[in-house]
């Protein structure tokens, strides 16, 4: 069976090119953590809400956010990324696992 040729680099590849593999892994972790909070709270969390939810300091939360923005400069939050590439994603019925599966699969999609 022939593979479909991708049109361009994947989001994951672009992230690795921008910030390297280790930082890409950390940015992806932040993305999944952010979406977990987003789904649990039912709204876009502030960084303070994110920090309280994960029981981390505000400075750590802002560093994680800054790393995401360095790796994905076109999307200020993981939610923005998900909305851009999957506008049909149902936030009202989603679980954190749903969001994680979707964002994981999308990182392999062509940018």
Image (spheres, rainbow, N blue to C red):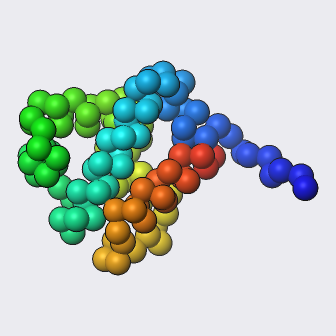
Q: On the picture, is 77 further left or further right than 52?
A: right
Q: On the picture, is 57 further left or further right than 102?
A: left
Asked if 14 appears above or below 107 in the picture, the reply is above
The residue most toward the right is 1
Number of marks present in the image shown:
0
Quadrant of the image containing the N terminus:
bottom right
Residue at 44% over, 31% down: 24
Residue at 36% over, 41% down: 29
Closer to us: 111 or 65: 65
The residue most toward the bottom is 93
Where does the image place residue 102, in percent across and percent down from the top left? 49, 59
Closer to us: 5 or 32: 32
Quadrant of the image containing the C terminus:
top right
Asked if 39 appears above or below 31 in the picture, the reply is below
Q: Can residue 37 be seen from the camera position used here?
A: yes
Residue at 25% over, 60% down: 38
Q: On the picture, is 109 further left or further right than 50?
A: right
Closer to us: 40 or 17: 40
Residue at 26% over, 34% down: 64
Asked if 17 appears above or below 93 in the picture, the reply is above
Where does the image place residue 10, in percent across and percent down from the top left? 61, 41
């Amino acid at each position: 069976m022939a593979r479909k040729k991708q049109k361009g680099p994947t989001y994951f590849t672009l992230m690795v090119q921008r910030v390297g593999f280790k930082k890409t892994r950390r940015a992806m972790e932040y993305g999944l953590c952010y979406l977990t909070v987003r789904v649990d709270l039912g709204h876009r969390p502030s960084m303070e809400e994110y920090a309280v939810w994960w029981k981390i300091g505000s400075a750590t939360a802002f560093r994680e956010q800054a790393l995401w923005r360095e790796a994905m400069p076109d999307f200020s939050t993981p939610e923005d990324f998900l909305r851009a590439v999957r506008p049909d994603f149902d936030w009202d019925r989603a679980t954190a696992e749903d969001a994680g599966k979707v964002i994981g699969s999308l990182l392999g999609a062509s940018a």
